[in-house]
Image: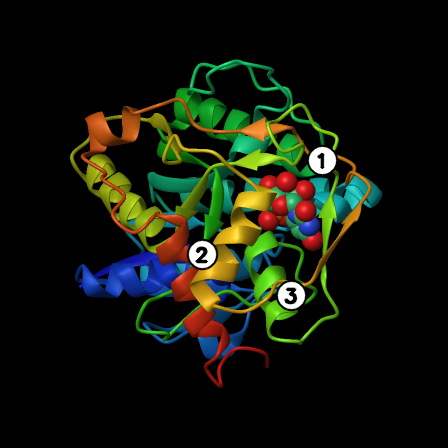
Amino acid sequence: MTNILVTGGAGYIGSHACKALARSGYTPITYDNLSTGWQDAVKFGPFEQGDLRDRARLDDVFAAYKPAAVMHFAALSQVGEAMAQPGKYWSNNVAGSLALIEAAVAAGCMRFVFSSTCATYGEHDNVVLDENTPQHPLNAYGASKRAIEDILRDFEAAHGLNHVIFRYFNVAGADPETEVGEFHQPETHLVPLLLDAIDGKREGLTVFGTDYDTPDGTCIRDYVHVCDLVDAHILGLNWLEQDNGSRVFNLGTGFGFSVMDVIEKSRTVTNRAVPFTIGPRRAGDCTRLVSGSTRAEKELGWSPKMSTLETMIGDAWRWHQTGSYQK
Ligand code: UDP
C-alpha cells in the first residue's frame, strides 16, 4: 500500500482526509503535534507525534515510511488569534511548513498537496474570486498561507517539487458515519458554535456585525462539506500521480450564504430555537468570500455532492450528538 504523510491528520479536515485516503487504498501516516488535534481522531493509519518545526523528527518519519506524497493540513487557523499573535502564525505555519517542505525534498518526496485558504484573497468588492485573483490577505493567517504558496512555487522552480494548492472556502459538516467530526478547543467557527448554542452547551451565538454591505448586513461565505473537500484532495493526489504538474484550485461551491441564512437553516434542520445576539464586527473578517471558479470541476472532475447547507448542518448536528463530540 502507498503511504501518504498527512500532517494535521488528528485535526478536523486531516482526519476526514485520512478516512478518504484509507477508503481509496492508501495508508495515511498522521504527523501531528496534538496542539489542536485529538489522538482519538487518528483511526485510519499509524500516528507519529511531532512538530512541523522539528526537522530531525520529520527526517526520521520520512525515512521510516517513505511516503509517496504529503498532504499538509497542520496549521493554526484562527483569524482572531492571528490578529493578536501574528508571530505564532509566522512561526508555526510558515517556519513549520518550510521545514516540512525541505524535509520532503531531501527525502525525494516530490508530490505535495497543500491546504490554503480563500483568506489569502482578502477584500475584493464585487470581484469574482478565481485562482487568478490578486492575493491581499487581511490577517496573519491568510498571509502565512500565501507565504507557504510562494515557498512551494520556489521549491518547484529550484527542486521540481510538484504541488497542488487548494484554497478552501468555509469548510463545514462531518463524516456522515460520525467516525470523525469537527471539535476545536476553543471553537471559533460558525456552524459548531451555532449547534452548541442550540444544544445549550454555550449561552448563545454572537453575530459578528450586521452592518456589512450585504442584503441582510451579515457576512457572506461559501460553505463546502468536509467530505466533498477531502474528495478533492484524493483527486489532487491522482493529478500529481499522473504528472500533470503543479496547479492551484479553489474549493468552494460558488454559492454564498449569510450568517443569518446559516442561523435560519440550523433552526429548520434541528427544529430547535437558535439563541443569538448581535455584536460588533470581528477584526479581520471580509464582507464576502465566494468562489467564482469551476477549475476543480473542469480539470479534476470534482463534483461536490454534499455541500448543501442542509446536509452540512445535518451531518454536523448528528456528530454533535455522538459521545465522541466534546472530549
Ligand atoms: N461568525 C459569527 N459569530 C461567530 C463566529 C463566526 O457571526 O461566533 C461569522 C463570521 O464573522 C463569518 C462567518 O460567521 O462571517 C464564518 O466565520 P468562521 O469563523 O466560521 O469562518 P471564517 O470565515 O472566519 O473562515
**Type of residue at label 2?**
Ile
Quarter of the image containing the C terminus? bottom right
Spatial CA span between label 3 and label 1: 19 Å
* Quarter residue 286 falls in: top right
Residue that carries the numbered disc 1 in the rendered image: 140
Q: Is disc 1's CB within 8 Å of ligand 1?
A: no
Measured as percent of width and height from the top left, residue 20 is found at 27, 60
Q: Which badge, 3 or 1, comes first in the chain's sequence?
A: 3
**How many other residues sit within 10 Å of disc 1, few (<14), some (14-19) or many (≥20)?**
many
Quarter of the figure with residue 131: top left
Q: Which coloring applies here?
A: rainbow
| Location of mark 2 (residue) | 13
Callout 2: CB less than 8 Å from ligand 1: no
Q: Nearer the viewer, residue 135 or 303?
A: 303
Q: Looking at the picture, which amino acid does disc 3 mark?
A: Ser
Q: Residue at x 46, y 60 (%)?
A: 268
Which of marks 2 and 3 precedes in the sequence?
A: 2
Compared with 127, 73 (above or below) is below
Tag 2: Cα neighbours inside 10 Å, few (<14), some, or many (≥20)? many
Cα separation between marks 2 and 1: 21 Å
Mark 3 burial class by Cα count in 10 Å: few <14, some 14-19, many 20+? some
Q: Position of residue 326 (x, y in %)?
A: 58, 78
Q: Is residue 96 above or below residue 272?
A: above
User: Could you say which is closer to the camera, residue 266 or residue 244?
Assistant: 266
Quadrant containing the N terminus in the rendered view:
bottom left
Under circle 3, the secondary element is loop
**CB under 8 Å between callouts 3 and 2?**
no
Residue matched to label 3: 35
**40 left or right, relative to 54:** left
Residue drawn at x 51%, y 76% is 39
Q: Are marks 2 and 1 in contact (CB under 8 Å)?
A: no
